[in-house]
Image (tube, helix red, strand yellow):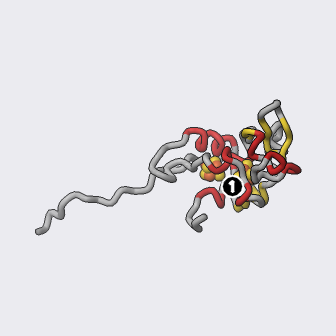
Amino acid sequence: MSENNPCLTCGACCAHFRVSFYWGECRSAGGIVPDELVEQISPYHAAMRGTTSKPTRCVSLMGEVGCGVRCTMYEQRSSACREFEASWEHGEHNPRCDAARAAHGLPPLTPPLQPDLSPDRAA
Ligand code: SF4
Ligand code: SF4
């Protein structure tokens, strides 16, 4: 994760959505997500503990939302976390990122400035 990653000073999505995924991603089913950090929410789905009720906050989120945060199981996180991208991370807007940030009083991320490619007036 790069030092410029906006997620390192955010964490809003980890404290806003129910973070659910296919049960088969858990260690006991052959996956990588530690079983003790999840709860089963249906025959086929698990969710990160702390994200199934209000106030929502994943048990694996360390730090203060909007200041400095860290996922304590970054390498073992589920596909739901791996696939959730910050807005504009790869050039695409993610309205759900905006929604999570707004719920925590944070402004939406903005696209990176494009270089000015207009020709110089002075030749
Ligand atoms: S596992 Fe990590 S990345 Fe996923 S919601 Fe929890 S703190 Fe966030
Ligand atoms: S809400 Fe967006 S910026 Fe904040 S941690 Fe999640 S993906 Fe990153």
**Element type at mark 1:** loop
Residue that extends furthest to the left in the rendered view of this protein: 123
Out of 72 and 63, give the one closest to the viewer: 72
- 36 or 104: nearer the viewer: 36
Nearer to the camera, 112 or 47: 47
Report the amino acid beneath label 1: Gly
88 displayed left or right of 63: left
Up the image or down, 14 lies above or below 71; here it is above
Percent position (x, y) of residue 76? 74, 56
- Residue 86 vs 17, above or below: the answer is below
Coordinates of residue 4 in the picture (x, y in percent): 56, 65
Front one among 105 and 16: 16
Q: Residue furthest top?
A: 42
Disc 1 designates what residue?
66
Residue 18 position in % (x across, y down):
75, 38
Q: Residue at x 60, y 44 (%)?
A: 97
